[in-house]
Amino acid sequence: MRQFRVLLNAAVLCLAPLVAQADEEAVTSFTLENGMDVVIVEDNRAPVVQHMVWYRAGSADEPKGASGVAHFLEHLLFKATENMESGELSATVAANGGRDNAFTSYDYTAYFQRVASDRLELMMQMEADRMRNIRLTESDITSERGVIIEERNQRTENNPRALFGEQLNAVQYHNHGYSVPIIGWMHEMQTLGMDDVMDFYNTHYYPNNAILVVSGDVDPEEVRSLAEKHYGTIPANPDLPDRVRTAEPPQNAERRVVFRDARVAQPYVSRSYLAPERDPGDQEMAAALTILAEVLGGGQTSYMTEKLQFEQQKAVWSGAYYRGASLDDTTFDVIVLPRPGLSLEETEAAMDDVLEQFMVDGVQPDQLERIKMQLRASQIYERDDVNSIANRYGQALAIGLTVEDVKAWPDLLKAVTEEDVMEAAGLVFNRDASVTGWLMQPEEVTQ
Amino acid sequence: MRQFRVLLNAAVLCLAPLVAQADEEAVTSFTLENGMDVVIVEDNRAPVVQHMVWYRAGSADEPKGASGVAHFLEHLLFKATENMESGELSATVAANGGRDNAFTSYDYTAYFQRVASDRLELMMQMEADRMRNIRLTESDITSERGVIIEERNQRTENNPRALFGEQLNAVQYHNHGYSVPIIGWMHEMQTLGMDDVMDFYNTHYYPNNAILVVSGDVDPEEVRSLAEKHYGTIPANPDLPDRVRTAEPPQNAERRVVFRDARVAQPYVSRSYLAPERDPGDQEMAAALTILAEVLGGGQTSYMTEKLQFEQQKAVWSGAYYRGASLDDTTFDVIVLPRPGLSLEETEAAMDDVLEQFMVDGVQPDQLERIKMQLRASQIYERDDVNSIANRYGQALAIGLTVEDVKAWPDLLKAVTEEDVMEAAGLVFNRDASVTGWLMQPEEVTQ
């Protein structure tokens, strides 16, 4: 591990001269007349293109009782349209040597293809077609519902960690859609039908609710005329609803969840704190929280790992996470996996002691510098990948940020000071807005 | 206290001969052609009548983000209609020597007047008028919104027990409307406007979603013709939505809530377990849970009180509650108020020990008999009150029960055996579907 760290630092040092250069991503952005946002990132190092369409509609935008419909619709967009057979889009991408897929999150649903750059127009033609022209049959609904239910069985029902995570989220949020799993509650997925799917499609799948992102070996002006030709001709939805989610009431009570499952091989303690997210023009706190997560639990040299694994030898693993790319309030999470024989009560006490001690010790300047270097390095690695570039812009615009916010983010991370990190820690470590979870084997319980 | 208990038992014994007679409530029920249910309970002992209209629409039927609108609308039904000035209805009731009011719960909203029985038609005329004819102004919305917000300030914001209760409910239910306070979340109440109110009114306030209950000194046939005249002429809503609420996913993780507030004078421990409710034709489990609540925490001779207050002297008070009259899954609650100086951790441990011991000890036959006698007595007392009679039927029909279910309930309680109670306890005391709460003063917290 120590060896690896040295290598990584060496890599960072080697890459450092590239930073200034890589800072200048060639981004062109504009909005079509029908309201569709377009972001183009030109990168001619390889003759490939990443073509993505992002909808500002995710699981947290679903109506009450229809959980899972955003993800269900994502699956169904690979069925027939007015102009394509079921499966034709993916088959065409593959026949052209590309790959395609899609994903659904709380705040967005995105579709993408990665192909040789001369195939871009074909991709646009097909993607624009399925924005408004899907033609589903009842048999599509029935068979694909079976698929998403099986997906839930595989990923969630068979996985105590996933089930535990669902319970933690449900307790973290009282009133917001982040309390509901992206894939949906099983009992609601089983009832999803044509009406649920088409209502969601006909509410959200319009150019004025979408973002086109194209990255790679393209000429921005050519992309613009292709976008106007294929997407610009689709009428906007004049009745697109405002994207207003139900907000949380004040979170003023500490919560705990104990999830017991015989399949648990490694028990652990987790804690999530409600936390602010990246907001347009206001990303400083999110930048500090991003650094805080790295300082506390971002790897072998992090504070928690140092204390809990190396010094006290109470944990086999620990970590801290912050998901700042979120439309609404997100969470800051810490997690500790105890060494064999240590109870979760002792583990939690050790975790609390370390967090308390961290508030006294503060951040060491050399650690902060090292983390910033590592973050810069991973940003640079990402820029070698047209997929990551497109994801970064698409996700940001889907959660309400701007191209300027994306461009400002690396500098905001670089500007975070020791004081900023400790201020963020003081703000976010509010037990009254926290959920502590124990994942463990069943024990004897009498009432 | 012991003296009081003896007196109560004596009262029960004296009343016992009345039981058979009181069993025969003179109930007439039918449905008007437009779908409005009518229940008439004739009781000529006093020349008064209780006139109620119940809507099958409560806070748990509210749309996402508009919490509090059911209760807000209840307030606004006292404003002007096509035929009445604002406040005229209540003024007319008062001028006729009566009283009137209304209330909102999770599952229903109800309006009532209690007046001399010869004024029944006037009540019907006014109540039927406001079912479809309210004429609200923006100034009504603004001023009455101020009233409900002040109501929330008084009853909830100024009351740590109420705030604590809201947090417990929010954590008990993941996906169901019972997680939201009846009065609404403050931040959503502040945004309620004319559209929210009129949408709720125009969805739910129709005769085919209402129950008329008239109890007291009336002739059922006369009531029928009055009801046909005043309510039967209101058109039904052919598009009345099915009353389908979002259901809970499996509750499979024990939860805890700690609420700290400087205003807490008496800390306590509570625990709620998700519990089945009274269902039409299927009330046996609910009857056993009703008895269980009495056995465990229903008064000075209950099991918890005996152990925690008298024997161990650890509690100043304890209780158990079960709210069986609910459309969807309800809760069974226990609560213990510790004696001064005992920590909530010790209190909870004592509570758990007592519940565990109860599962070993079981129910004593003489205690079960005493409780059944007390329940019968309170049922008989209730029958002296036209208000309670009307409430019993109106509430039952509003949550999907039938007149037959209401009539069967006393016998079902009488038939509960020791084994039924212990089986119900075994079922309901499932920690994986429970929320344990601590209400306490703030303490030093570091993270």
Image (tube, coloured by chain):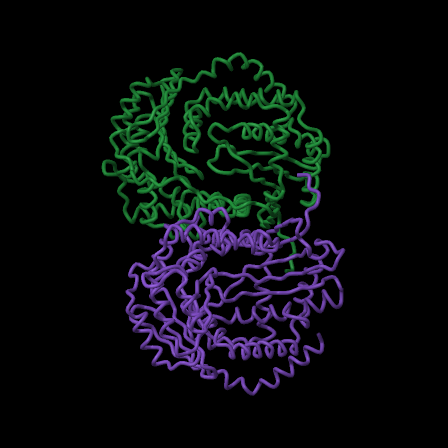
Chain colours: A purple, B green
Above/below status of B240 relative to A257 = above
Residue at the far front: name it: A95
Quarter of the image for residue B211 reads: top left
Q: Nearer the viewer, residue A425 or B5?
A: A425
A203 with respect to A294 (left or right) = left
Q: Position of residue B390 (x, y in %)?
A: 41, 26
Q: Position of residue B440 (x, y in %)?
A: 62, 47
Residue at 39% x, 75% y: name it.
A120
Residue at the far top: name it: B17
Whether residue B311 is visible to the viewer of this picture, yes or no, is yes
Residue at 57% x, 59% y: name it.
A273
Whether residue A411 is visible to the viewer of this picture, yes or no, is no
Q: Position of residue A92 (x, y in %)?
A: 40, 69
Q: How many marks?
A: 0
Q: Nearer the viewer, residue A26 or A305?
A: A26
Q: Nearer the viewer, residue A196 or B150?
A: A196
Where is the N terminus of chain A found, in terms of image quarters?
bottom right
Residue at 51% x, 15% y: name it.
B19
B15 with respect to B100 (left or right) = right
Where is the C terminus of chain A found, in terms of image quarters?
top right
Residue at the far bottom: name it: A17
B258 with respect to A20 (left or right) = right
Residue at 32% x, 69% y: name it.
A231
Above/below status of A243 relative to A66 = below
A51 with respect to B377 (left or right) = left
Q: Position of residue B20 (x, y in %)?
A: 50, 13
Above/below status of B367 relative to A116 = above
